[in-house]
Image (cartoon, helix red, strand yellow):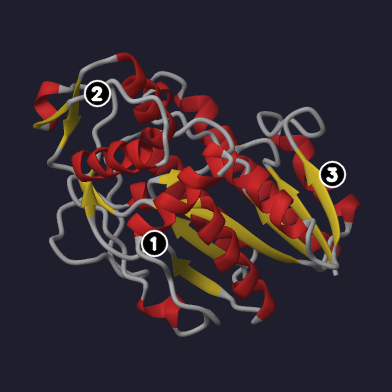
Amino acid sequence: MTILVTGANGQLGRETVLALQEDDEVLLAIGREELDFSRSDQVAEAIADYAAEWVINCAAYTQVDKAEEEYELAFTINRDAARAVAKGVKLSGGRLLHISTDFIFGGEQSSPYKENDTASPLGVYGQSKLEGEQAVREVLPEALILRTAWVYGVQGHNFVKTILRLASERETLRVVDDQIGTPSWTGDIVRAIRSLIKTEATGTYQFTNEGVASWYDFAMEIVASAKQLGFPVMAKTIQPIPTEEFPLPAKRPAYSVMSKVKIRAVLDHQIPHWRTSLHAMLKQESGA
């Protein structure tokens, strides 16, 4: 089987490429250098020319705060280019797995969001990703859409690496404790992707690790695990703070936990708890 991974230089794209290289598949990987997704008019033809049996679209504009200013670019990449990828897949007769996000939800609920719950994004990033989902479905109703959240891994920049850096530089960290979600390790996301492709699933699914956390909870566990593994840690105190004390250009959902009932039914493995996966990622980062 021939698999094409777009956004191959991003943190999830890189992890996907590295994992799939271990499989007996013909793997094609393209990043911004090979195909500029800000030029969405060129994307459909290029994707069709690859003639892959599966396209995993990891390409996205993910700078949540910057999107409030660069909204045209965010919509070009997250909506228009997503539509173009779907058109290219349709032209070549392949299958599409498109990556989306918990940010399509507004955080009003207090129970996990199901796949068909009403979307109400709070900012440009979430709205552009929601419209990207809609564009993909319009072109390819049988496309596979996978939403995930709070993504981190050894590749790229993410919250875990930021906390590791700050904890090595400061004695006190201040972290928001009133935004609730679930961290997702790229290693586990890729394993879920493999299962979905293997079962030839269609429709919308949601994947995160098990468990629930605030950013404060997440940071506490990062620092505790980092100490155990021998990372340089200066931080002695982590202070929980409300969102209003850490204002950012883009509003975040207060609650973005997503239901995994649907995806559990198709996975051939148990989903690890986020604490377990965080420790595995940190061991990988440390080279242990």
Residue at 44%, 46% (x, y): give it: 151
Label count reads 3
Q: Work out whether residue 51 or residue 42 is closer to the camera in this orientation and state it.
A: 51
Horizontal and vertical percent position of residue 174 = 17, 25
- Which element is circle 3 on? helix
Figure check: 267 above or below 97: below
Residue 109 sits in which quadrant?
Answer: bottom left
> Which residue type does callout 2 highlight?
Ala
Q: Which mark is residue 142?
A: none
Neighbor class of circle 1 (other Cα within 10 Å; few <14, some 14-19, many 20+) is many
Neighbor class of circle 2 (other Cα within 10 Å; few <14, some 14-19, many 20+) is some
Q: Which residue is mark 3?
A: 46
Give the quarter of the figure containing the N terminus. Answer: bottom right
Side (left or right) of 132 relative to 180? right
| N-terminal-most mark, 3 or 1 | 3
Horizontal and vertical percent position of residue 166 = 33, 20
Residue at 63%, 42% (x, y): give it: 59
Side (left or right) of 123 relative to 262? left
Task: Tell me how far mark 3 sits from mark 1, CA to CA.
Answer: 34 Å
| N-terminal-most mark, 2 or 1 | 1
Front: mark 3 or 2: 2
> Which residue type does callout 1 highlight?
Asn
Residue at 55%, 55% (x, y): give it: 187
Figure check: 99 above or below 215: below
Q: Farthest residue in the bottom direction?
A: 265
Q: Which mark is residue 209?
A: 1
Side (left or right) of 221 relative to 85? left
Neighbor class of circle 3 (other Cα within 10 Å; few <14, some 14-19, many 20+) is some
Residue at 88%, 52% (x, y): give it: 50
Horizontal and vertical percent position of residue 79 = 55, 43
Task: Tell me how far mark 2 sits from mark 1, CA to CA.
Answer: 26 Å
Q: Which mark is residue 235?
A: 2
